[in-house]
Image (spheres, grey):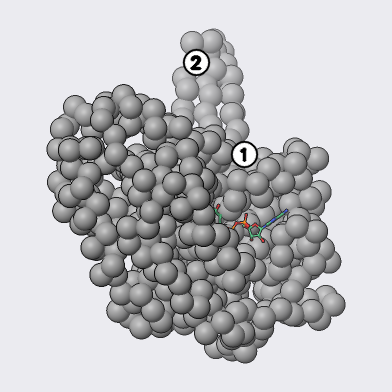
Amino acid sequence: MDSAFFGHVVNGAEIESVDGARFASVNPWTRQPWTEVALGGPADADLAIRAARRAFDEGDWPRMGFERRGRVLHRFADLLLENTDVLAAADSQDMGKPITQARHDVTRAAHNIRFFADHARLAVGETLPMDTGHHAYSRFEPAGVVVAIAPWNFPLMLETWKIAPALAWGNTVVLKPAEDSPTSATIAARLGLEAGLPPGVFNVVHGYGPDSVGQALTEHADIDRITFTGESNTGRALARAASATLTPVSMELGGKGANIVFVDADLDRAVSWSIQASFRNAGQVCLAGSRIFVAREIYDEFLGRIAEAAERMRVGDPADPATELGPLASQEHFTKVKGYLDRVESEGGKVRAGGTVDGWVIRPTVLVDLPPTAPHAQEEIFGPVATVHAFDTEDEVVALANDTRYGLNALLFTSDLDRAHRVAGRLRAGTVWVNCFFIRDLRAPFGGVGDSGVGREGGNFSREFFTEPKAVVIEIAAAKT
Ligand code: NAD
């Protein structure tokens, strides 16, 4: 497989940009370019949308039925797994993800494809026998051309989270991966063609967002859905673009998850999940639970344990299978996260663990003594930086947890069943994890409250977004005598 150049994939062919432009993908560990990628613009966006439109209006895919589509999608998932090495290396070199985590992402990507292929095939609609002598039922027609815009933190995994339901329900897709993690999308599109996806069904275009290919895709007049994952401010720009054409948009945006450790928590579990929730993927996780509130009675013990576990993490070369934490994804992002470290003392805080940098690597960092209103505890740092705060009462901690413009997720650790249910109900978040983290059932609603998103995806929620649900009403005439 060619690794010197990654093109757009449009209408079944891997191609250069219309104007021949390319950009380099920089490996954040070596801080050197490792490959070249086609740099698209509005003309490339238009080409891809037109290919997707033709494949939708004239091609087999929307009409092929769930069985046959499902077989192609399962073959696609098989090929992703067979190519785990190359896909994982692509994500890891693009954005610095430790290779072991990148391999895990490929497994999850294949699972996304299988899940939505099966979900669509097995889905049932409603039948509504009416008292009036009529019979109503629902159908779910494919929506049309779906534009999928993805972030760089879980490249392949989040791209498949979008394209799998879109394709399974019979749509055609134009995917724009993030400019910091472009290459696995081209590999996936090559494999999709090999699996039997007809030309034009799954297209990929590369390049930047504002005033470029991303914006051109979202402003295009001939699209039917936009599914976006990224920053909240980018979401606002997309919502404005989509308003001109009244295109439905699903948005999974930023987060600042609260992580509450009650006095009766199993501390081993709380510490080990908090390490994952704060430092997995170098903290570049929308679902991070790095705003940690700990019952005052156990604050010192928890802090000692999490600081020690953070110091023990294996930090270094993402290509080493033993590495748990690698560099941040780009120089720009590193500079942003480093800016928070530079402001710890001026905001009244102290570094309890980590806080040091090497290249674009920031060691797992635990901050204490910051007020919950400090920028570190309010803004999405998107790096390996956790803040730890003490609390006294359940009411107080629920108020602290909910005191954020985000509402993507929250974690709580307790062995009190009543408290688990009570607090889960009171937290303003799209997902609440009790005594665990990151575990997903793809049938469940996924999305956020407030600045964390608009709409939900997952299971039937994805069906509703990626289809046009339709009501059919039939009159049942009385028998002629
Ligand atoms: P980003 O918003 O900068 O970019 C995301 C994508 O949008 C990229 O492909 C980018 O090129 C494109 N884009 C940017 N401006 C655009 C525009 N005007 N028009 C069209 N496309 C545009 O986000 P990022 O830095 O890549 O990712 C990190 C963010 O994503 C964090 O805020 C994180 O919380 C969020 N995220 C959310 C979830 C979730 O499920 N809620 C999951 C992962 C990441």
Observer-nearest of 36 and 293 = 293
What quarter of the picture does the N terminus occupy?
A: bottom right
Badge 2 residue CB within 8 Å of ligand 1: no
Q: Is mark 2 on a helix, strand or loop?
A: loop
Q: Name the residue under label 1.
A: 468
Quadrant of residue 465 within the rendered picture: top right
Residue 181 occupies which quadrant of the picture? bottom right
Q: What element carries label 1?
A: strand
- 257 versus 73 height, above or below: above
Which residue position is annotated with label 2?
130
User: Is residue 289 depicted above or below 412 in this figure?
Assistant: below
Q: Give the left or right position of residue 243, taking residue 313 as reference.
A: right
Ligand 1's quadrant is bottom right
Q: Does residue 138 appear anywhere in the picture?
A: yes
Q: Which amino acid does label 1 sit on?
A: Glu
Please tell me which residue lies in front, 80 or 209.
209
Q: Tell me the crowding category of disc 2: few under 14, some 14 to 19, or many 20 or more residues within 10 angstroms, Cα based.
A: few
Residue 479 in percent (x, y) is at: 53, 14
What is the CA distance from the residue labelled 1 to the residue labelled 2? 22 Å
Is 458 positioned to the left or the right of 416 in the image? right
- The answer to whether residue 155 is left or right of residue 16 is left
Q: Residues within 10 Å of mark 1 (few under 14, many from 20)?
A: some
Specify which label sits upstream in the sequence, 1 or 2: 2
Query: In the depicted view, which residue is nearer to us: 200 or 230?
Result: 230
Of 370 and 283, nearer the camera is 370
- Report whether the residue tagged 1 is closer than 8 Å to ligand 1: no
Q: Where is residue 371 in the image (x, y as percent from the top left)?
A: 42, 40
Q: Which residue is drawn at 33% across and 31% down?
A: 397
Q: Residue at x 62, y 39 (%)?
A: 468
Q: Position of residue 449 (x, y in %)?
A: 50, 35
